[in-house]
Amino acid sequence: MADGTWYDADIDRVIVSEQQIREKTEDLAKQVAADYRAVESVLLVGVLKGAVMFMADFARALGRYGPKTEMEFMAVSSYGQGTSSSGVVRILKDLDRDITGRHVVIVEDIVDSGLTLSWLRKYLQSRQPASVEVVALFRKPDAIKVQVPVRYVGFDIPNEFVVGYGLDFAERYRELPYVGVLKPEVYARS
Ligand code: XMP
Ligand code: MG
């Protein structure tokens, strides 16, 4: 847990530790590897920026167990600088290539209302891939507004705003190795 780094001073409590994330990532990679063992390769579509840490660790884990992977990134925006979903999805960065006939796995950091993912799934599905599934490291079951099938989920977490391991508050805290909740005074001073 907290070990005296600068960011620990801003964290109220840790929700999921670095070790838990590491173990779960390994588990998820084994599940995906088992399910896709018959396919030639999997196209991972990481959702920037939040999923960047998970994408990097998940892809490496999958490399140890599973089929070959290729990586693509998209950037979409549904939040501004704040902490609640607007429901409006904008593409900031599109795919760089055709995904027709590919087995696509969307790699998401967190499913909150589900609005972003629901939109993204439909968007990718419309491009005639062979399949589209989702791996999300975190999910907030109490925040869900639209049902969206997420085949692989790491952790169900409470409906609170969290930071770390790619997740930010106003672009900060992404580098934390764990996921936690900020102290209220951090919001007050920003
Ligand atoms: P929705 O509501 O569309 O949101 O499922 C998905 C995207 O919103 C961001 N998000 C968060 N970012 N802490 C963050 O730093 C959170 O607690 C949080 N909840 C949602 C995230 O980018 C996710 O992909
Ligand atoms: Mg995200």
Image (cartoon, rainbow, N blue to C red):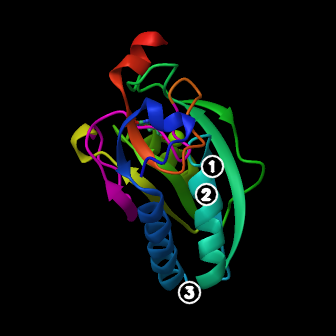
Say whether residue 108 is magenta.
no
Q: In this view, does 188 lie above or below 66?
A: above
Q: Are marks 1 and 2 in contact (CB under 8 Å)?
A: yes
What type is the residue that disc 2 sits on? Met
Circle 2 packing at 10 Å, graded few (<14), some (14-19), many (20+), is many
Separation (CA) of disc 2 from disc 3 = 20 Å
Residue at mark 1: 52
| Ligand 1 image-quadrant field | top left
Residue at mark 3: 37
Give the mark toward the camera: 2 or 3: 2
Image point 40% across, 12% down: which residue? 188
Image: magenta residue range: 144-168
Circle 1 packing at 10 Å, graded few (<14), some (14-19), many (20+), is many
Majority secondary structure of the magenta segment? loop
Separation (CA) of disc 3 from disc 1 = 25 Å
Locate residue 13 relative to residue 49 in the image: left or right: left
Residue at mark 2: 55
Image point 36% across, 46% down: which residue? 14
